[in-house]
Image (spheres, rainbow, N blue to C red):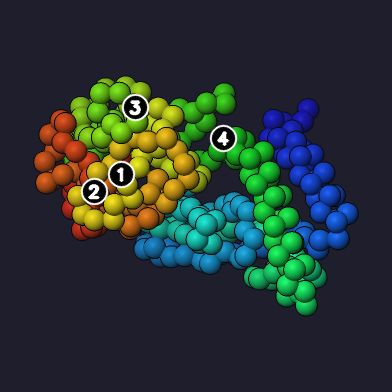
Amino acid sequence: MRTQHQRARRTRRMIALPVAAAVMAGGLPARAAERTVELTSRGGYQSHRLPDGATDVELIQQTAGGCRFGRTWGFDLTNKELWVDGGCGGRFKITYAATGSGDSGSENASNSDSSSNVGAAVAAAAVIAGIALIASHKDKDKDRDDGWQDNDGGWQGRQIRGKGGLCMDIEGSVRQGRPLIVYGCNSGANQRFEWTRRGELRVGGMCLDVANGNPQDGARVIAYPCNGGANQRWRAWGGEIRSQDSGKCLDIENGRARPGTAVIMYRCNGGENQRWSW
């Protein structure tokens, strides 16, 4: 009997093939390629630059530490970066769109004598990548081992605890513009977060958002409709949660672990009020 994962992979192939065929019919030399890299954090943050046209990264073998997506390893397709932290080490399969001739182990796509052909190939590769990512999102997330799990097409989040055992909480209820605070843990919907493969922290169908993209210390964090902005992308760095936009940390304002205290952005300092667990 074919497993659900096998069926999902077959579905992705069926979706991608018509687009690939259309590209080939148009004479564009785009193709999918894979390469494998090994990366180990050695207790600290390490990164590897992804090749041009990268569309996905998969951990295929753990070689050190406890590797959990979004916590001790992850990737950012926009910034072309694969990263590990907290002792995680492993072999990673990188899928990317190559152009022209050349082996699949090459870091960069082959050069072309015609700049227009290269531009067209990259555009076509982006179309294929987008469709493949949409088709694979649901089953990819179910395969993760980090505890942030999708459930029947929706998602099931978890609490994020900070100093004093208080939980991150969208004040009152999840509505646009409501601030992020800490509050007594109560399993409410406004305290259950999903960390997506895009680096978003979702709660109640909205995203944690650094208000107005403010890069300054003290910037407010609010619930806001997800829009893919850099101020809605986050990275776990040990027990810290850092903005991919400013590099600053989620911090309990003034270090006061009391119900109702705002969670703000502040330069990372390793303080207890910037340490989170989930």
Does residue 276 lie above or below 268 as drawn? Answer: above
Q: Are marks 4 and 3 in contact (CB under 8 Å)?
A: no
Disc 3 secondary structure class: loop
Pinpoint residue 267: horizontal percent, then vertical percent: 23, 57
* Cα separation between marks 1 and 2: 7 Å
Q: State which mark lies toward you, 1 or 4.
A: 1
Amino acid type assigned to the residue bearing label 2 in the image: Ala
Q: Amino acid at mark 3?
A: Arg
**Amino acid type assigned to the residue bearing label 1 in the image:** Ala
**Location of mark 3 (residue):** 175
Q: Which residue is mark 4?
A: 142
Q: Position of residue 41 (x, y in %)?
A: 43, 63
* Whether residue 127 is visible: yes
Could you tell whether 6 is left or right of 22 in the image? Answer: left
Q: Which residue is mark 2?
A: 219
Query: For the point 64% across and 60% down, which residue is it?
Result: 53
Instruction: Tell me, yes or no, whether the two marked residues, 1 and 2, touch with CB atoms within 8 Å.
Output: yes
Q: Position of residue 90 (x, y in %)?
A: 53, 58
